[in-house]
Amino acid sequence: MSTLLERIHSRAAVVGIIGQGYVGLPLALVFEAAGFCVLGFDVDPLKVEALNRGESYIKHIGSERVAAAGGRGRVTAPADIDRRRDCDAVLICVPTPLGRHREPDLSYIQSTAREIARRLRPGQLVVLESTTYPGTTEEEVLPVLASTGLGCPEDFLLAFSPEREDPGNARFSTRTIPKVVGGVNPASTEAAVALYGTAVERVVPVTSARVAESCKLLENVYRSINIALVNELKMTFDRMGIDIWEVIEAAKTKPFGFTPFYPGPGLGGHCIPLDPFYLSWKAAEHGIWTRFIELAGEINTSMPRWVVQKVMHALNEEGKSARAARILVLGLSYKEDIDDDRESPSYEIIELLQEVGARVDYCDPYFPVARPGRKHDIGLRSVACSAEVFATYDALVVATAHARFKDPALYRRVPLVVDTRNIVREHPEGPRRLVKA
Ligand SMILES: NC(=O)c1ccc[n+]([C@@H]2O[C@H](COP(=O)([O-])OP(=O)(O)OC[C@H]3O[C@@H](n4cnc5c(N)ncnc54)[C@H](O)[C@@H]3O)[C@@H](O)[C@H]2O)c1
């Protein structure tokens, strides 16, 4: 343990990061910037090759940062999995999706734990970063590592530290976002705190891995429930002829006790639509029904259907039917100005519109071609983002608030815009009709 701490403080420690996605890649870059040699592992050979060429496959991270780190010679992406033995610290950033019945899919964590166990050596620190239910580190990872005959904390150390990424946020970065850390024992917490303390501005130790796991879920459940609340209020106020966006702007002026959340076409990304159900699944084991989580899930997942209803109703008022109407959905990304379309509600909106017979296209400069995902494969290519193209559609549905879509000139000759993000303004030249949804 003292050797590990010395190696951390002297930057002689080698940091291995398993999973070089939206979480693992920026983490690799902050440890490199802190002076460590970093090995970035991924099962996707395209990512490994790109990293070794000094290229980023995530737009908001940028190839300059990856190239600069690669140029200093401290970051590599080894194809050889046995290089994990060279690592003093191994950080796990693999996916934690839901299964078909909304049950946690821990298969990535479990297989990664087995791969680490095969190469585990005394003196290593292992940290799980993937979002998961309380107890995963102790119940799923610890027994696999301990099955090698090595013990924690005498031989290896094990902790949980949740990632808090906000892709595209210019105010906060991996280095400046405080990092919560909880070990399965005090020695593990101490080692993990020492490691992260070299690379991020503030480390927040907690008493156990379970508290750290729960902290991440509290943060994500909080968002999911508050978004569901404004989505419910959006539907309520809509029926009353009141604009929820104006209401939120007014409420925001209260200087205390109010945090604004915004409605939308449904949840997206790898966190908020999925993580709360990790907790509800685990809670059931303890005889608890997490009703807030379920209710928020029900409201948020019904949003694409509500948006499609609004589109059909608006077309109807124009004397048109959704069947055979030409509809353009703006945005595949789940969030503005990033190239992440995981769990994006746009796909469901497109499919629901197709189900009622509409001829649907999409426009998203971040996705020239729609790639097949876990649940959807729409097989479409983006149309050009121009007023001429937009004017050829019966209706536009704004699903993502990309900066590019905020140009009023784009909507001048459009007959109908259904805006789920409140970015299109009334203008004498068009759109002819604007509906908020
Ligand atoms: N994306 C976010 O904003 C965010 C924020 C906070 C937490 N998280 C959590 O972090 C975890 C990772 O999320 P992400 O967004 O980085 O996912 P991602 O899909 O972008 O990245 C995961 C990477 O792991 C790789 N991988 C899978 N199995 C592997 C294995 N056995 N060995 C090596 N590599 C493997 C995949 O190829 C992929 O590149 C999830 O648990 C997620 O909930 C994500």
Image (cartoon, rainbow, N blue to C red):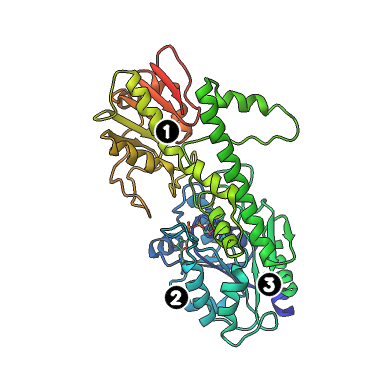
* Residue on which the image places disc 2: 80
Residue toward you, 126 or 212: 212
Amino acid identity at mark 3:
Val
Picture coordinates of residue 64, whole percent (x, y) = 51, 51
User: In the structure shown, which secondary structural element does the residue marked by tag 2 occupy?
Assistant: loop
Side of 196 where 119 appears, left or right: left
User: In the structure shown, which secondary structural element does the residue marked by tag 1 occupy?
Assistant: helix
Quadrant assignment, res 412: top left
User: Can the viewer see residue 223?
Assistant: yes
Q: What is the C-alpha distance between the residues marked 3 and 1?
A: 45 Å
User: Can the viewer see residue 198?
Assistant: no
The relative height of residue 250 versus residue 399 in the rendered view (above or below) is above
Does label 3 or label 1 sit earlier along the sequence?
3
Residue toward you, 163 or 295: 295
Picture coordinates of residue 285, whole percent (x, y) = 58, 65
Q: What is the C-alpha distance between the residues marked 1 and 2?
A: 48 Å
Q: CB atoms at circles 3 and 1 under 8 Å apart? A: no
Residue at 56% x, 31% y is 233
Circle on res. 307: 1
Amino acid identity at mark 1:
Val
Q: How crowded is mark 2: few (under 14 residues within 10 Å), some or many (20 or more)?
A: few
Quadrant assignment, res 85: bottom right
Q: How crowded is mark 1: few (under 14 residues within 10 Å), some or many (20 or more)?
A: many
Residue at 55% x, 21% y is 242
Residue extending furthest toward the left? 324
The relative height of residue 232 versus residue 410 in the rendered view (above or below) is below
Circle on res. 184: 3
Q: Residues within 10 Å of mark 3 (few under 14, many from 20)?
A: many
Residue at 25% x, 30% y is 323
Q: CB atoms at circles 1 and 2 under 8 Å apart? A: no
Which numbered disc, 3 or 2, marks the residue closer to the eye?
A: 3
Q: What is the C-alpha distance between the residues marked 3 and 2?
A: 29 Å
